[in-house]
Amino acid sequence: MTTITIDTIADAKTDDIQIIGKPSVCEKATIKVNGKSNRLILGRNVHFGRVVFDFRGDNNVVEIEDNVLLRGNVLVHDGSRIRIGNGTKFHFNAVLEARETTTIDMGKGCLISQVRLTTCDVHSVFDLETGDRINRSRDIKLHDHVWLAYDVLVSKGTEIGSHSVVGAKALVAGKFPPNCVIGGNPAKVIRTGITWDHRSLDHVPDHDTGPSLRVSSAV
């Protein structure tokens, strides 16, 4: 296994991993690599709090776009990919796990609390009659401007539409439309026709009253 402290290296390439870019601010970050041909791609103005990257197996990719604030643990396994979109902020430590050739795709301008996103159950479950595995890994997709509140668990196969909010301690699985509030265990849509803002405001800002507020019937 190779271990790298990221504040001492940038634009580096070995058989294990290629690093493209460098964080503009790095409090403490570590890269662990046990495999070959992995890639970490960093955009401009990327800010790392305490971050651990864990690359397991070959041909994994983590792509972090411009203006991202990242804290937590990021794991990719056996040809998986994680993308974090422009301007997304992690204000607490989160856990992102993409295993078994799956993808976590996170859009622009998301707000992430202390949460967990995982594409895999890690252990296998089988049907006794057929012998087939019944809990295969599946991708996770967050569209632009999604807010995940404290202690949310987003499980495999989940897709959340843009401008939506997921309430604290929700267990989220399945597909959810844009412009909605999601909550509960299991999570369900509890309100539609909403948007949200990072600031504490009494009214929707004028620049947010255009097409982005239109509620779609599908993700």
Image (tube, rainbow, N blue to C red):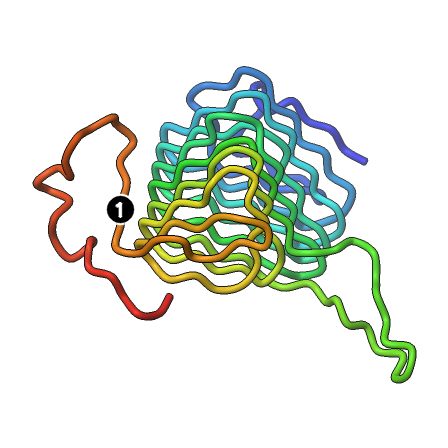
Residue closest to the eye, 36 or 84: 84
Residue at the far bottom: name it.
130
In this picture, residue 107 sits left or right of residue 153? left
Crowd class of label 1 (few under 14; some 14 to 19; many from 20; radius 10 Å): many
Image quarter where the N terminus lies is top right
Residue closest to the eye, 158 or 61: 158
Q: Is residue 161 above or below residue 21?
A: below
Please name the residue shown 58% across and 21% down the image.
Answer: 50
Residue 172 in the image, given as x and y percentages of width and height = 55, 53
Residue behind mark 1? 195
State how many labels appear: 1
Local SS, label 1:
loop
Please name the residue shown 39% across and 54% down the image.
Answer: 143
Residue 106 in the image, given as x and y percentages of width and height = 45, 49
Q: Is residue 206 above or below residue 129?
A: above
In this picture, residue 94 sits left or right of residue 130? left
Quadrant housing residue 109:
top left
Q: Is residue 27 above or below residue 102?
A: above
Please name the residue shown 40% across and 41% down the image.
Answer: 147
